[in-house]
Amino acid sequence: MIANLIVGGLAAGCLYAMVGIAIVIVLNITDIANFAQGEMAMVTTFFAYWLLDSVGLTWWEAVPIAIFFGLVQGIVIQQVVIRPLIGSPVLSAIIATLGLNIVLNSVAGLIWGHQTYTFPSPFAFSAPFMIGTVPISVDSVVNITAGLAIVIAMTCFLRFTWIGLGLRAASQNPTVARMMGVSISRSSAIAWGLGGLVGGISGILVAPSLFLDTNLMGALLIKAFAGGVLGGLHSLIGVFLGCLALGVAENLVGAYVSPAFGEAITFIIIIAVLVVRPEGVFGRVRVRKV
Amino acid sequence: MTVATDIARPRRSLSFGAGALLLGLCFAAACAAPFVLNGYGLYVLTLTGVFALVALGLNLLTGYAGQISLCHAAFFGVGAYATAILTQKAGVPYLLSILAGALFTAAVGAIVAVPAMRLRSLYLAIATLGFGVVLQKIIFEWRSLTNGGGGLALSPPAIAGYELGASGLYFLTLAFVMLGLWGAWNVSRGRTGRALLIVKESEIAAGALGIPAARFKVIAFAISAFYAAVGGGLFAYLVRYIHPENFSVGLSIAFLSMVVIGGLGTIGGSIVGAAFYVIIPELLRGIKDAPGLVFGLLLVIVMVLMPQGLWGLVRRLGRRT
């Protein structure tokens, strides 16, 4: 029973984690909490669906094209909306992404309507893995593997490549980074492109577990933020584990403590954790100069 | 984070005469409105006033003290329910129950502020969001008092035996908005306002100046919750049917948007932001299929062109005349 609950929680948690990672990439480099991340991913997923359904590509052809679309989408949005806001109050940019969230949702509604679609997955009909007597769906395994792979790839990219080092410099001290020849504007564009790319992957992996409609990501977005905060927003692995923990906690609280207050208790746990660790479990307290 | 330093500095660009004239004109227009508008228009305008009150309070918290809150919809809801329950079930006079509800909510706000003291930016946003979810859940589950998911239907409000109609409630809201403006003006320009500004800039600097950042954060949360609750008390009797779902996270995000669109750290901006958020979607309702699209685009355009908010535009126009 408890093992089933934990596995179910992990499955939900890795959906949050996929969105969470995309949010954190943008957040860490540009300081902007991207409320449009979910809708960007939703549009990318619909684009993939269109490639599969109307153009008639196979899953393995459509998905890379769609992910590339996600990358381009992120860069375009950064150039049009975010770039003029570099140097403005961060909250203004956040509210702009909120507007963008509404725009993308409406555009998707105009193009694809508000009915639900079933997004195919090449792993859908595989038999679940068995660990002891607990079945684990292949989708969950794929999602967790993909999430971990993204975390590792992003960490390596940010640590060991010139572009990644530039991005980190831009996030830590924009003024000094600029003096060292790092373009803040380009860093921001790369971050948004990466966010769009990872968001696209997350949408495509999440959609088969849910139904594809224009509100695909609505519920996941807030949970992803909450999980990210729990783990610590400045650590990719922290966000990943935080989201998984959130999924498991929700399931266990819902089953054992109180179904009615499940979500509320989960948030109380998050608040309690934050009181003890204000920057999340895996976060480091940033030393600020006066 | 260094970029946000120059937005809340009190600048006097309107001359006193021009400012007074503008305020007087707005007030005269607001007083004349019930005689010109139909019932629906009056409802929209009253709602604008209600949201403006919440935005005024939130702006003191976010614009001045620099603390993000995503639980203002819950404060708004607690105020609405407290007022409604006191009036309907305990028979307390309407004005008194608005006041009592607001004081109660201010206490709730102060409690929320305690764990919020150590948190900043997104961590604070998610923690307050959590409080919002918890408060909303309590309203939902405390069925004996709030009737839970059934919602509360309210009879028309009365003051001293005189039943308030639509225009009566409108004038009451207008009076509260004027009071709220006066209060916010005084808070922002007085000792508290200056303390909040320095808390926003740097808590360490505030401490070095002998300003207890923690205490002022609690004060800011309490004042802000008070404003939200007064708005809630008016809202309950404006719509006359309240339901826990009215007070969800989406509304909190809308309140925050109003403040930012209007202008962080500006008093007038709160009113302009609330008007933008309430009136524009109503005007767009006629456009087939795309009210969300146009509203979202407007939101993006306003932010990209006027990152300091609409109030900057108003101020610039005022300076030119």
Image (spheres, rainbow, N blue to C red):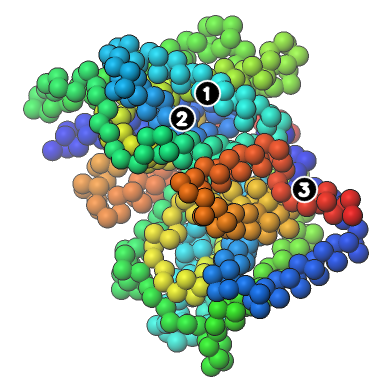
Q: Residues within 10 Å of mark 1 (few under 14, many from 20)?
A: many
Question: Residue B287: image x %, image y %?
Answer: 52, 50
* Residue A81 x %, y %: 62, 31
In this view, the residue in front, B207 or A18, is A18
Up-down relation of residue B286 to residue A123 (above or below):
below
Q: Which mark is residue B20?
A: none
For the residues bearing labels 2 and 3, Cβ distance under 8 angstroms: no
- Looking at the rendered structure, the secondary structure element under dot 1 is helix
The residue depicted at 74 percent of the width and 21 percent of the height is A175
Residue receiving disc 2: A40
Dot 2 amino acid type: Met
**Spot occupied by residue A200 in the image (x, y as percentages of width and height):** 41, 23
Question: Same chain, marks 1 and 2?
Answer: yes
> Residue at position x 75%, y 39% from top?
B5
Left or right position of A35 against B243 = right
Residue at x-position 54% and y-position 70%: B40
Q: In the rendered image, which quarter contains the N terminus of chain A?
A: top left
Q: Earlier in the sequence, mark 1 or mark 2?
A: 2
Q: Which residue is mark 3?
A: B313
Q: CA distance from mark 1 to mark 3?
A: 30 Å
The circle on residue A74 is 1
Seen from the viewer's position, the closer of residues A104 and A236 is A104
- Check the image and report above or below for B188 versus B160: above
Q: Amino acid at mark 1?
A: Gly
> Most extreme residue toward the top, as rendered?
A161
Q: Secondary structure at mark 2?
A: helix
Q: Assign the C terminus of chain A to one quadrant of the image.
A: top right
> Are dots 1 and 2 in contact, CB under 8 Å?
yes
From the top left corner, tell me how far across and down residue A226 is, in percent. 43, 39
